[in-house]
Image (spheres, rainbow, N blue to C red):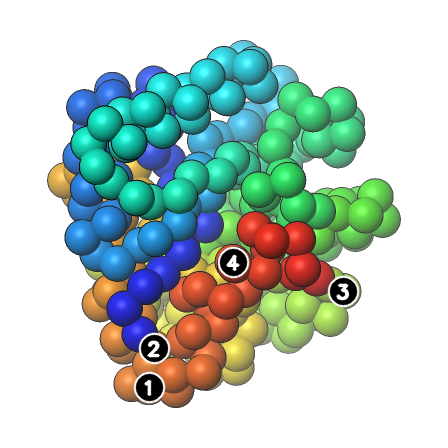
Amino acid sequence: MNSYIDMHAHLLPGLDDGAENSAMALKMLRQAQAEGIREIILTPHYKPMRHNPRPETVRQALYRLEELRDAAGLSVRLYLGNEVYYGSDVIEALQEDRAFTMADSSCVLVEFNPVQDYAYIREATYSLLAEGYIPILAHVERYRCLMEKKARVKELCGMGCRLQVNASSIAGKNGMTCRKNVKWLLRQEYVSFVGTDCHDDRRRMPKMAKAAAYVARKYGDAYCRRIFRENAAALIHGSYG
């Protein structure tokens, strides 16, 4: 397998703590294409009760990046989403199109404080599902309340939540605890999506190939294809869920 879809990327310049400028964003696109990433859902942070870029500003940033991509002769296809930090106003923001779902789907990439209590995460999951959204829990390997009591992972998945892990965690770049957690999640086939969670062109780059090779070797080609490409493709084309 040598082509991937990255569904968690902070690559739009100047919107969050991701790419600092257009030059860095273009370099990250080059890195992604060289890595075998063919499509990217761009997921700038959306944080409730904060000043977030207006949707028009985000769309304009996408259009400018697409122009730079085309001028550079790159072919990576780009889509919009958000990484939404859950709060009381998140559902209203989604309903009013102030926050983006993933590539215009019903899926929402949602994150929490890594030490958030389970009752809060469970209630947030229920609230999103009740409004017709499919929550995708970002970098699930980081959440202490889930990794210390793994039956909670099964409960969330049974409710309809989907789980995303970072490719860097699979590759062992985020410490042994995250690596141990993500290996357990993969063994149980609880992972639905892998994303790079890239933020720059140096330390947190858009890298997937090493992680995909590991998953294919340890857990099989079919599962690797699902979580590195097929599920994200279905999401983009409106057939996931």
Label drawn at residue 215: 2
Label drawn at residue 232: 4
**Whole-percent x, y for residue 186 in the image:** 45, 76
**Quadrant containing the C terminus in the rendered view:** bottom right
Give the label, 3 or 2, closer to the camera. Answer: 2
Tell which residue pokes out farthest to the right in this image: 130
Label 1 close to label 3 by CB (< 8 Å): no
Q: In front here: 200 or 39?
A: 39
Residue at 26% of width from left, 75% of height from top?
Answer: 213
Quadrant of residue 150 in the image? bottom right
**Whole-percent x, y for residue 114 in the image:** 49, 47
Q: Is residue 122 above or below residue 15?
A: below
Label 1: which secondary element: helix
Q: Earlier in the sequence, mark 3 or mark 4?
A: 3
Label drawn at residue 218: 1
Identity, as a three-letter code, of the amino acid under mark 1: Lys
Residue at 58% of width from left, 19% of height from top?
Answer: 55
Answer yes or no: is residue 142 visible. Answer: no
Identity, as a three-letter code, of the amino acid under mark 4: Ala
Identity, as a three-letter code, of the amino acid under mark 2: Val
Q: Earlier in the sequence, mark 3 or mark 2?
A: 3
Judged left or right of residue 228, residue 151 is right
